[in-house]
Image: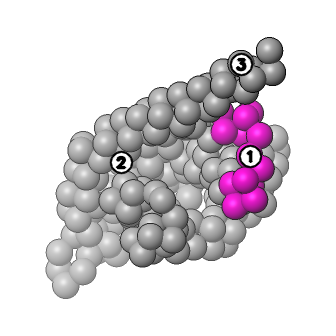
Amino acid sequence: MALGLCIRNLIQRSSPSLFWADIEMTIKIVQTAAVLEAFHSMIGLVRSPWGTCLLQVFSRLYVLWGIMAAVPADELGPFLMVGCMSWCCVEVPRYMYYALNLMDEVPYPLVWLRYSLFAVLYPSGITGELGCTYFAVMYMRAHVEQYSWQGLPIWWALAVMTLMYVPGAPTMYMHMVAQRRKVLKVLDAADALADGKNK
């Protein structure tokens, strides 16, 4: 649903404020619910490593609630759309993969998408998140009286939080590179074995 709303707004060339008004509630529900995925990973319900899962969920929630929901959408410009669109394009095949994997019925094209789209969508998502952060910090600095907590400017906290992208972004990306290599290698070996039996 969130992806459909993103696409509709892009087709209509909506302004960031109209885009956000249309997608805000859906994206907040979907991305906040991802906390369950991190929890499931921690308790062993799913096989995803809980550290990388928690890092991804935390970074998105930080951007969603600390920036996108806190600053007027027009101030974030196209980075708001880039971030949301990237999140949606990653999540749709990922959750389709998870659902079909429960039934052991995942077609190869979906496996390939699940483990390949990140190559483009992780960098675009990170670009959207960092772009939103930059413009949010600039806006908060210009409206420091509105964005302060007990006399301390909030934009300092956002700037410091953004430093987590330095170790976090390469870690997430390289984790997915390793996962892709491992999963596709197993599938290719299974295909080769099946071809050998059919000859």
The answer to whether residue 126 is seen in the rendering is yes
Residue 119 falls inside the magenta stretch? no
Q: Please give the range of residues in magenta.
A: 100-112
Q: Is disc 1 placed on a helix, strand or loop? A: loop
Q: In this view of the protein, can residue 3 be seen by the observer? A: no
Cα–Cα span, label 2 and label 3 = 55 Å
Residue bearing the label numbered 3: 196
Q: Which residue is drawn at 51% across and 71% down?
A: 45
Q: Quadrant of residue 169?
A: top left
Closer to the chain start, of discs 3 and 1, is 1
Which of 145/183 is in front? Answer: 183
Disc marking residue 106: 1
Q: Is residue 109 left or right of residue 134?
A: right
Q: 189 or 44, which is in the foreground?
A: 189
Pinpoint residue 197: horizontal percent, then vertical percent.
75, 23
Q: Give the number of the mark in front: 1 or 2.
A: 1
Query: Which amino acid, by three-letter code, is at mark 2?
Result: Tyr
- Disc 2, SS: helix
**Side of 109 where 46 appears, left or right:** left
Identity of the amino acid at label 1?
A: Val
In the displayed image of the protein, which residue is found farthest to the top?
199
**What residue do we see at 31% from left, 42% from top?**
171
Identified at 22% across, 50% down, the residue is 163
Location of residue 65 in the rendering, given as x and y in whole percent from the top left corner: 46, 70
